[in-house]
Image (cartoon, grey):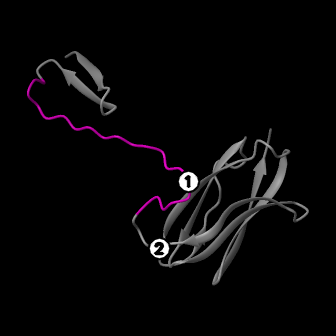
Amino acid sequence: MTWGYYTDNSTGCTMTSGAGQANRPNACFTMTAASGTGPVSNIVPKEYSLNQNYPNPFNPVTKINFEVPKQGFVSLKIFDVLGREVKTLVNEVKTPGVYSIDFNGAELSSGVYFYRMESAEFTDIKKMMLIK
């Protein structure tokens, strides 16, 4: 059996075909990377959560996921080992949801950093390492 594929440039969908596959239904799935600070799913979490970044160690980009169970002000900030704030990633009211943010540490030196999520009812801190 010989298989081939083609990409529909209007949709970006890649379809496969093979000998004896005429008139068989095809399925097309397209995926896009999440960006920005909007929720990445419709799931409403039951509690606040700040997850460990990944990859960790990283160079220069890492992903930080967090969950917000109810609408409220949320901040997510990066600190160096001396406790100095080096970057604010989130500083706004968030609706309930699961969020994912890419942090680019290209402007920072190699070393250990901490990220802290705060809301009215929740505070958590995680450690990450930037290696260049």
The residue singled out by tag 1 in the image is 36
Q: Is residue 123 left or right of residue 19?
A: right
Q: What secondary structure is marked by label 1?
A: loop
Bin the neighbour count of mark 2 within 10 Å (Cα to Cα): few under 14, some 14-19, many 20 and up: some
Circles 1 and 2: CB atoms closer than 8 Å: no
Disc 1 marks a residue whose amino acid type is Gly
Instruction: Give SS at disc 2.
Output: loop
| Residue at point 57%, 75% (across, down) | 48
Q: Tell me what residue is drawn at x 22 percent, y 15 percent.
A: 2
**What is the tally of numbered marks visible in this picture?**
2
Magenta residues?
21-41
* Horizontal and vertical percent position of residue 74: 63, 72
Quadrant in the rendering for residue 9 = top left
Q: Quadrant of residue 123?
A: bottom right
Counting from the top left corner in percent of width and height, residue 13 is at 31, 32
Q: Position of residue 73 (x, y in %)?
A: 61, 76
Using the image, determine if residue 98 lies above or below residue 69. Answer: above
Confirm whether the magenta stretch covers residue 34. Answer: yes
The label shown at residue 45 is 2
Query: Height in image: 115 above or below 7?
Result: below
The dominant secondary structure in magenta is: loop
